Image: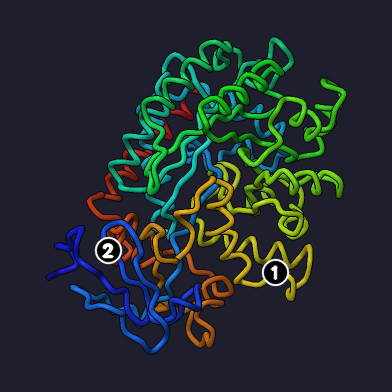
Amino acid sequence: MSLASQTSNSRLWIQHPLACADPAAAGGVVIQGTRIIERVAAGHRPSEPVDQSFDASQHVLLPGLVNTHHHFYQTLTRAYTPALNKELFPWLTTLYDVWANLDEEQLEVASELAMAELLLSGCTTVADHHYVFSNALAEAIDRQVETARRLGVRAALTRGSMSVGRDDGGLPPQFVVQDEATILDDSRRLISRYHQREEGAMVTVALAPCSPFSVSRELMKATADLAKAEDVRLHTHLAETEDETRYCQRLFGLRPLDYLDECGWLGNRTWLAHGIHFSDEEIRRLGEAGTGIAHCPSSNMVLGSGLCRTLELERAGAPVGLAVDGSASNDHSNLAEEMRQAMLLGRLRYSPAQVSHADVIRWATQGSARCLGREDIGGLAPGQQADLALFKLDEPRFSGAENPLAALLLCGAHRADRVMVAGRWRVIDSQVQNLDLEALMARHRAAAQRLWQAA
């Protein structure tokens, strides 16, 4: 039986990997259906006969990487000249006028390219934070669900929102601001239509006001109430810059975390993007609440936002995950490369002994899964979803590497050879299956040019 003809009842052994992130699976893992059913010890065979095997002796085996924060539409404005060399607030005000012209066709092609790029980097669960809605972009999340299903990728999609425009002291243009009733009604619709609650869910929906400076206090509180009633997660940007801290203190008389707490957001239902500018006391509170942090190292560096206190957060009890963030502040969608950035930036803040390659792989898998409230992904234990990323070390950059697992980060792995999602190969020989990538890139370039010209 060939790998392509694998059935839901067949047992596939990913055998004898060159190296594995989980020492208990040094001999590989056995897949049946959508799940891992056995970890195989080094030098051993599976406990029961298998129907197929895949020789992984040239591959480093990881759980599928999990991205916790992105803005797919921003792939259309990478390295956009008017926004270069700016900090967050001026960067946003420059680009909001461009993004305000987005239509559904542009969003769809941007989302497809971002998801494909993530898949190729070994990412099996993609998260997106979409908050730009206009008359031309009323059903953005619906388009993203369709795209994720077509590519066979696992998706955590967040219904973002902006309700405070420039007329009321906010940053976004007025015509991409929505009223609160529209936002909440559409949030209910999306949860009802798409949010999957079962183990192995392929699509989940969370609620995600853009930031404290783009929505009203009333909407922040109403969103928290709705998330609790519907049992879904909450997401927003927080503590990304000192400008944000000053803004919140001026507008609300509170630091960002105090404002978040007042609005009913501080808890284990919530994960936050960036989370850079927290005091020791605030880190303690985040840990006690179990609130997650999506660490975005490249974006934080590009915009000069600061250094996230990852180790203190994790030690306090806050889940720490990894994220590429938007492709206009990164400017790529490659989670494997983001792991290397996280390790190097962590060593700049702490020391090489304190931030190892294993720590960062944990953030990109188990930690990210915890941020998304998932226990069924992010690892290789029996019962977890069969989401795998396999990397070859056959490029010049890896030649001479003695430790294959460490080499992924130290030598700069950037493209997976094989990627499996829910038991299905979605990337084979570094090619996304059933996708004409050249044609997609051509459509994407055309969509980007059309967006720039409209600005």
Which residue is pictured at 46% across the width and 36% down the height? 157
Task: Find residue 32 and name its label.
Answer: 2
First in sequence, mark 2 or 1: give its number: 2
Label 1: few (<14), some (14–19) or many (≥20) C-alpha neighbours in 10 Å:
many
For the image, the number of numbered tags is 2
Residue 262: x %, y % from top left: 77, 26
Furthest-left residue in this view: 1
The residue type indicated by label 2 comes to Gln
Which residue is pictured at 48% across the width and 22% down the height? 187
Label 2: few (<14), some (14–19) or many (≥20) C-alpha neighbours in 10 Å:
many
Residue 352: x %, y % from top left: 73, 74
Q: Please tell me whether mark 1 sits on a helix, a strand or a loop.
A: loop
The residue type indicated by label 1 comes to Val
- What residue is shown with label 1? 355
Which residue is pictured at 56% across the width and 77% down the height? 406
Task: Find residue 440 and name its label.
Answer: none
